[in-house]
Image: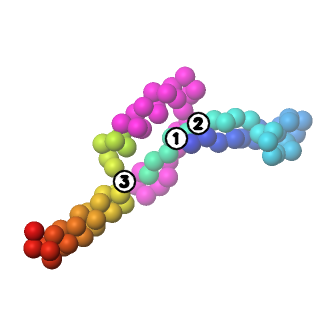
Amino acid sequence: MYAERKRCNRPSCRCAAGGDALHGPYLYRRWLENGRLRRQYVKAAESEQVRAGLAEWRRLHPPTRSTRELLTELRRLLRHLDASGV
């Protein structure tokens, strides 16, 4: 989930100048679907529920890079044990 600030495009609004005067932050969740980056607005009232769901998904699906690094370390340790004759 990420936060984004927006400009409303009304010429007389404070956000017309940009910078820190933009509206928001508005929360969105992002995901890849068929090679395309998708996003969906998350209502403030639902933000904690979405955060909890994302945390659970991350727990069940650890990043591939971390898994690869752990496997590399495990292989290195196994080679070390084999070489020392343990």
Q: Residues within 10 Å of mark 1 (few under 14, many from 20)?
A: some
Q: Which residue is mark 2?
A: 27
The span shown in magenta is 33-56
Residue name at image x 24 percent, y 70 percent: 76
Q: CA distance from mark 2 to mark 1?
A: 7 Å
Q: Nearer the viewer, mark 3 or mark 2?
A: 3
Q: Which residue is mark 1?
A: 1
Q: Is residue 5 magenta?
A: no
| Contact, mark 3 vs mark 2 (Cβ under 8 Å) | no
Q: Position of residue 26 (x, y in %)?
A: 63, 35
Residue 28 appears in which quarter of the rendering? top right
Q: Position of residue 57 (x, y in %)?
A: 36, 40
Q: Residues within 10 Å of mark 3 (few under 14, many from 20)?
A: few
Residue name at image x 15 percent, y 77 percent: 83
Amino acid beneath label 3? Pro
Residue name at image x 79 percent, y 42 percent: 20
| Contact, mark 2 vs mark 1 (Cβ under 8 Å) | yes
Left or right, residue 38 beside residue 5 = left
Amino acid beneath label 1? Met
Q: Earlier in the sequence, mark 3 or mark 2?
A: 2
Residue 9 appears in which quarter of the rendering? top right
Left or right, residue 48 beside residue 18 = left
